[in-house]
Amino acid sequence: MEIAKGTDLPDLLSHLGYRVRRLGSYYTTKEMDSIRIKGRRTWKRYSNGTGGDAITFLQEFCGKDFREAVNYLLEYNGHRARASPAPRPKPVRQAEKPVFSLPIPNQDQRRVFAYLQKRGIAPQVIRGFIDSGLLYEDGLHHNCVFVGRDSSGKPVFASKRGTYDLDGPGFKGDAVGSDKSVAFRLPCDPALDWVAVFEAPIDLMSFCTLHRAVTSNAVALCGLYQGPLDTYLRENPNLKQIVLCLDADGPGQEATEKFREEYAQKGYTISTRTPAQGKDWNEYLQQRGRARERGDRQQAAAR
């Protein structure tokens, strides 16, 4: 068990055909940018909260049961101990990319409206996103559907967010065939030379609630993959400034420093905005709302 659990994950993933790359003190892969490998022995996938060691990785992504995963890792490590040099990665067959299609919409947006209002998003902001074709409620599971549109306005991406999270984090996931290099974004105003960058669509909407003047020039990466920002910058060469508004937690701030250095070298002016409280902009928005409610109650009691 110690041998299996102690398997070097970047080496194993390369052996399995994944394209491994370094991201600060972590490793990730080209195929799954939401995965983070720390200390070369443990992994976590931030898009759905799963994680573990080499055994759980094989169970999660390679369809192996526990015994099969352990046996595979013992054989793998035994081969590594006897052979030199390390085994070369096996070529990965390029599967045909699935066709993207938006989830079927619901007849109304009541659950999405109620859920986002509960999260502190202003009704005017919610209505603005719905009217712009960037948000709707799906008819099957009543998820929030955040629609990413390319430069021509065509839908190419959809991030789904469950509207029921009473017992913990709700469902999150992208629609099959989504173009991660576009993700979720607001149109670019050519009169402005900046773009604000967030991790999640709800954080972007929270920022718009806090700063009502922001109605354009924003990108939600739907994770920490920088592809959507690169696409936005390439499509809008008038942009000269990047405002990084990523989460205040460890991965978010590590990505902030990485992006700051990388895009400064490309000639962009970089600034950062971090929520005054909480780990992200929505958490800050909700805490701010609760503090305001307490203040209102105290004033009413004093009267």
Image: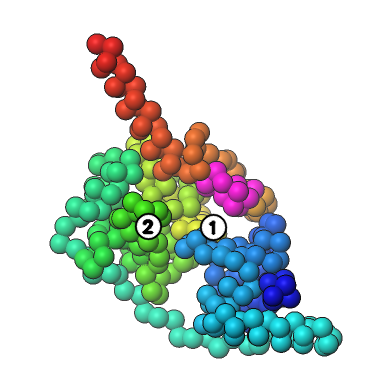
Q: Nearer the viewer, mark 1 or mark 2?
A: 2
Label 1 vs 2, first from the N-terminus: 2
**Residue 294 image offset from top left, x and y in percent:** 34, 25
Image: 228 above or below 19: above
In magenta, the rendered stretch is: 241-257
Q: How is the image coloured?
A: rainbow
Residue 65 x, y percent position in the rendering: 54, 82
Give the position of the N terminus as an image quadrant.
Answer: bottom right
Indicate the position of residue 166 as horizontal and vertical percent values.
33, 51
- Under circle 2, the secondary element is loop
Amino acid type at image mark 1: Leu
Q: Position of residue 122 (x, y in %)?
A: 29, 40
Mark 1 element type: loop
Label drawn at residue 170 = 2
Q: Is residue 280 left or right of residue 297?
A: right
Q: Amino acid at mark 2?
A: Gly
35 lies above or below 249: below
Depth check, front residue: 273 or 26: 26
For label 1, the residue is 224
The residue drawn where x is 40% and y is 32% is 288
Neighbor class of circle 2 (other Cα within 10 Å; few <14, some 14-19, many 20+) is few
> Residue at the spot x=40%, y=53% of the render?
168
Residue at image position (47%, 63%) is: 48
Question: Camera-side residue: 152 or 12?
Answer: 12
Say above or below: 198 vs 58: above
